[in-house]
Image: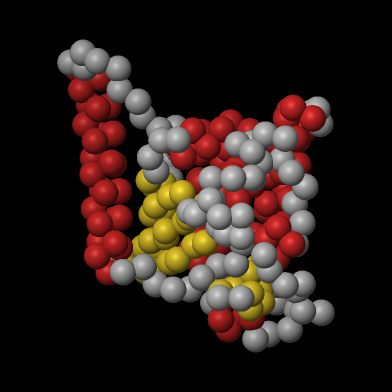
Amino acid sequence: MPLRLKVPRAGFVGLALATAAVVSASVAGVSAQSSRGTVDRPVRISRWPCRVIAKLPLRKVMDKGWDRSETIRRQCEELAVARAVVVLEWGSSDSQSHAKTGMAIQDDVVVARVRIPPVGQTIVLLAHELQHVVEKTRGLDFEAEAKRPGSGVWQAFDGFETQGAIDIGRQVEAECRQRHGSSSEHTRSPEIGLAPVTQRQYKGPTPPA
């Protein structure tokens, strides 16, 4: 989906960083308590090494993406190394809506707000948007690259799109299909998100020649 370079509000950026720090500290505290045998109730710790903050049921989408896609696991590992923070939220369920990502950099940390519509290809959309965050952590200048022919980055409505993110979405779709087969039951699942990936679904124009 088109990447919006609209910077999240400063208050949101600070809150996201603080929340990520609290989550990391909580996990560390739980691990320490477990080693001392002082935990007396079940504690759910995310398998994700990266700092992705989401509420249920989006956490379920994340977990299923982790289980079903090697590509998503690699994305998360790269985001963890970059110390990026991603806040994942449901977007509008309007049929015309699409996933959106806004990003900012604070103290050399990329902070992103990703909104995914609760319909259709949620896992594929998740991978697509995470790839935009990965691209940002790699130092990609979307605006500058969009002006360079053949760069794989172009202007798309109210933001930018990249061929890399589209390719990642298709790759994740293929991984999910390979894992679950091509039965109609799986291809119809909106949670798995295995409908055919097309440029039109990404709401972006055809890349410049």
131 and 31: which one is in front? 131
The colour scheme used to paint the residues is secondary structure
- Indicate the position of residue 21 as horizontal and vertical percent values: 26, 48
* The N terminus, quarter of image: bottom right
- Indicate the position of residue 93 as horizontal and vertical percent values: 53, 51
Q: Residue at x 74, y 62 (%)?
A: 200
Q: Is residue 106 left or right of residue 91?
A: left
Q: Residue at x 40, y 63 (%)?
A: 110
Q: Is residue 74 visible?
A: no
- Indicate the position of residue 198 as horizontal and vertical percent values: 77, 56
Q: Residue at x 24, y 65 (%)?
A: 11
Q: Is residue 108 left or right of residue 79?
A: left
- Indicate the position of residue 60 as horizontal and vertical percent values: 49, 33
Q: Is residue 65 above or below residue 16?
A: above
User: How many marks overall?
Assistant: 0
Q: Is residue 34 above or below residue 54?
A: above
Q: Is residue 125 visible?
A: yes
Q: Is residue 196 above or below residue 4?
A: above
29 and 170: which one is in front? 170
Q: Residue at x 28, y 34 (%)?
A: 27
Q: Is residue 40 left or right of residue 56?
A: left
Q: In which quadrant of the rendered view does residue 85 lie? A: bottom left
Q: Is residue 68 left or right of residue 186?
A: left
